[in-house]
Image (cartoon, coloured by chain):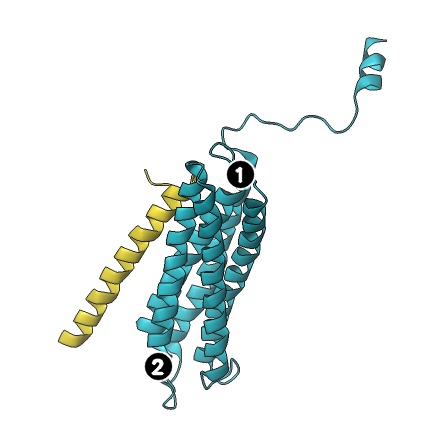
Chain colours: A cyan, B yellow
Amino acid sequence: MEAAAHVEHHHGPPAPNVSSRVEAQFLGMLLFIISEVMLFGAFFTAYFFIRVVADGGWFPINDVDLPKAIAGVNTAILISSSFTMHWALEGARNENRNALRVGLLTTALLGLTFLTVQVNEYVHIGFAPHDHAQGTIFYGLTGLHGAHVFVGLTLLTFATIRAFRGHFTAKEHRGVEVPGIYWHFVDVMWIFVYSTVYLL
Amino acid sequence: MLNPLRSEQEAFRFLLYVAVVMAVIVGLVFLARAIW
């Protein structure tokens, strides 16, 4: 009788298990980034394999070299965007709405500039992915990273719109914090890509 | 211990460490190539 009454009053699914000390959103981002590290690891494995076994060595190939200087400037642009992202988060923590808004907007614009320069690089680089194994892994690694910048930009766009609508406080700003962690991760990956593919 | 997934502040600090470490590694490789 009592059980029947209980069933009658219960609506919807059972309450989620909150026994973990890690918040669900952060646990999700943690598992996601771990899977991303493995994905990039697979591409880097292919890259190092090609560096060792491919005929002709690494670039320059057929007098075509990678645009190290332009990519270096692009690297500076992307690293700068991590500073503006950090500034935006500090703004959120200190209830400085102006810093939050300008920081997020600047980060998104710097990320967009990075992607634009990357696409321009593809247009003028002088080889295609199917020309040789080195070209395949170059487009593979930089393209994989570019796709992640695009995802980061999408997250940043939502965070920026929310910031301009008055969301986020000093206590509740997870909607900026999680994209911020992701953005820094994307920048860390680019440091590895630029150092290994362009410089070394 | 630094955990870049715990907060944005730690992720930012991790990024700075990675940038410095990679700059040192690239510098050492260039130096080694110049010597040998």
| Farthest residue, direction top | A1
Tell me where residue A37 appears, x and y as whole percent. Answer: 46, 54
Residue A126 vertical placement versus A45 (above, below): below
| Quadrant into which the C terminus of chain A falls | bottom left
Residue B5: tell me if it is visible. no
Residue A11 vertical placement versus A2 (above, below): below
Q: Chain of mark 2?
A: A
Residue type pointed to by label 1: Phe
| Farthest residue, direction front | A98
* Same subunit: marks 2 and 1: yes
Q: Nearer the viewer, mark 2 or mark 1?
A: 1
Image point (21%, 71%), residue name: B30
| Quadrant into which the N terminus of chain A falls | top right
Tell me where residue A171 appears, x and y as whole percent. Answer: 48, 31
Residue A165: tell me if it is visible. yes
Give the mark, 2 or 1, whose residue is nearer the N terminus.
2
Tell me where residue A69 appears, x and y as whole percent. Answer: 33, 75
Task: Tell me the distance, in whole angstroms, between the alpha carbons under discs 2 and 1.
Answer: 51 Å
Please give left or right for residue A192 compared with residue A13 in the image. Answer: left
Q: Of helix, strand and loop, which one carries label 1? A: loop
Tell me where residue A130 appears, x and y as whole percent. Answer: 53, 82
Residue type pointed to by label 2: Gly
Q: Of helix, strand and loop, which one carries label 2? A: loop
Name which quarter of the figure residue A189 lies in: bottom left
Residue A106 vertical placement versus A46 (above, below): above
Q: Nearer the viewer, residue A101 or A126?
A: A101
Image point (36%, 83%), residue name: A65
Q: Are marks 2 and 1 in contact (CB under 8 Å)?
A: no
Give the residue at mark 2: A57
Give the residue at mark 1: A168
Is disc 1 surrounded by few (<14), some (14 to 19) or many (20+) residues within 10 Å?
many
